Image (tube, helix red, strand yellow):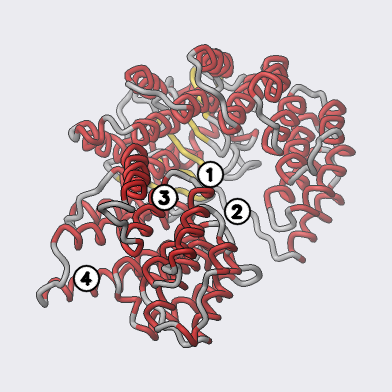
Amino acid sequence: MEGRHLDALLRYRDALRSSASSCPVDPFFAFPAVLKSCAALSLPSAVAQLHARAVRSGCHSHPFVLTSLISTYARLSLPHLAAVLLPPASSSSSSTLTVCYNALISGFAVNGLHISALSLFRRMLRCGASFNSITMLGLLPCGPHLPLRPLSGCSALHACNVKAGTDVDPAVANCLITMYARCGAVDLARRVFDCANSAAAAAAAAAPPLPTGERDAHALVRWNSMVSAYAQNGLAAEALELYQEMVERAGVEPDAVTMVGVLSCCANLGAPAVAREVEQRISGDPSFSTNTFLLNALINMNARCGNLPRAQKLFDEMPHRTVVSWTAIISGYGIHGEGRKAAELFDKMLAAGVRPDGVVMVSVLAACSHAGLTEEGLRHFRRMEGAHGLAPGTEHYACVVDLLGRAGRLQEAQRVISSMPVAPDGAVWGALLGACKIHRDVETAELAFRNVVALEPGNVGYYVLMANIYSDAGRLDGAARVRVMMRRRGLRKEPGVSYVEHGGSVHTFFADDGSHPQAGEIHRLVGELEALVGGGGGAGRHSERLAVAFALMNSEPGEKLVVIKNLRVCEDCHMFLRRVSAVVGREITVRDATRFHHFAGGECSCNGYW
């Protein structure tokens, strides 16, 4: 692609040299094409020279040339230079103004100047220029970035579309779905999605104006947008349900974007059966089976669904590995408690000449932390800047604090926080707070808690953690104070939810859940197990106990059980599951919010280090 643009510039130069004799260059047609090539090659100085030539030749005010200049400056991240070229409303036609404003709004939006883009839109309306679908496609991505009340701003933009009739444009409808999803308004995104589907069906029934290929493309983007909307807002089960509807009833053929989103949901839910179906579809399509993004998603999914050998096999067979590929497999070993293997893979990545980025550094530091490899983790952290040219961010400092904290080196962890070149965020103080829970250090916990709630006052997990620290220390007055703080701030603990896949469906369990069709049998089995191994009453019937009982009832002897939980496994349930694994002679795998616990023969793979 770059070669084609470079060839265009060389041809233009040759044409200029010969234009004096036989073949004069027509600036009205040449400038826009050459400007496009300059933008593609990121040549701002060449654009400035072309701009000067356009002024000298007198064609700079021609609508075709003017809009090309504005668009080019915007694409080169020079939107303010583009704004200078905006023509006055009094001397330009409405269509020229619309095209110029569209180019400028898009340029501001692409460069992250969301407020400026919206101000420009208001200016566009005041000067009488009409907006169209292209205007909205540039403007709608700005909605979620509005300060104070982004959802209100998004609704206002939607209203503008409805009033102008641009909301019926399939591309605009897809953009509206994405806009609402990024605001967390999934219900509104779904309403737009359903309306767009109905409009598309009605248009198809009345002689559709679009060719089939183009119509199918709009439908695919719409379904992908809605699947992503669910996935991005933590509604993985809804995303998988929509995917099944897309394939089985709507007849929309998924693409690589669909597959990546679905695999991500399978990874979050721990739904290997659905993932296997997706993997079969991928392996049957040559364009899918060589797609690096999809292969990375498959590695991540298999690792997070508990099938680490399959993840390793996929990684080994990859024809081309990126830093994302290495991150996926390193992170996979890390969450399974195999920190040593994760660190070895990181060394192999460096030996292969792959330059690490900040994300893979988080993965290897976290892997060391969860495996108790304190010195190994510190070695990698200290080499970040000198050996890899990476400035540690707050996420890396949070890993180091966690690394030291889990090892009981709380004072050293505090010194790391004090020496940070940037202000510590909630994750850093939260890591220290978590370490205080492990080592029952109430005094340091109070310091960490004061800082973390000042930074993240709405994060209910930190309040629960502090209340538990007080309770463990017998400080019931302190625990009560924290709960009062929660009530005053309108905070409620997130309910624990556990998932088990069986019979092609994902079964969901809450604490003391009685809604499942087999609830009576499940609770009887949990009671029997509690009588056998102890651990009844105090912890209550937490969701993972019910999920494990359901899995035991609905699986073959010797079959491995896999349960996914959204929160961290509590100490009582951890002990309970260890003992149950010995009594029933089965391997029980529980993936909680941070890692995998492989229970077998009365032991856990984490060795109590979680």
Q: Which of the numbered marks, if any, corresponds to residue 359?
A: none
Residue receiving disc 1: 566
- Pick the residue in front: 573 or 464: 464
Q: Earlier in the sequence, mark 3 or mark 2?
A: 3
Q: Earlier in the sequence, mark 2 or mark 1?
A: 2
Q: Residue at x 66, y 26 (%)?
A: 389
Q: Secondary structure at mark 4?
A: helix
Residue receiving disc 4: 200
- Pick the residue in front: 243 or 537: 243
Q: Earlier in the sequence, mark 1 or mark 4?
A: 4
Q: CA distance from mark 4 to mark 2?
A: 39 Å
Residue receiving disc 2: 494
The quarter of the displayed image where residue 535 is located: top right
Q: Position of residue 167 (x, y in %)?
A: 35, 76
Q: Position of residue 144 (x, y in %)?
A: 54, 64
Q: Earlier in the sequence, mark 4 or mark 2?
A: 4
Q: CA distance from mark 4 to mark 3?
A: 26 Å
- Pick the residue in front: 536 or 188: 188
Q: Secondary structure at mark 2?
A: loop
Left or right? Give the position of 396 relative to 169.
right
Q: Nearer the viewer, mark 3 or mark 1?
A: 3
Q: Secondary structure at mark 1?
A: loop
Residue 108, can we see it? yes
Mark 3: amino acid: Ala
Residues at circles 2 and 1 in contact by the CB criterion of under 8 Å? yes
Mark 4: amino acid: Ala
Q: Secondary structure at mark 3?
A: helix
**How busy is the neighbourhood of tag 3: few (under 14 within 10 Å), some, or many (20 plus)?**
many
Q: Position of residue 414 (x, y in %)?
A: 85, 32
Q: Earlier in the sequence, mark 3 or mark 1?
A: 3
Q: Residue at x 75, y 31 (%)?
A: 401
Q: Nearer the viewer, mark 4 or mark 2?
A: 4
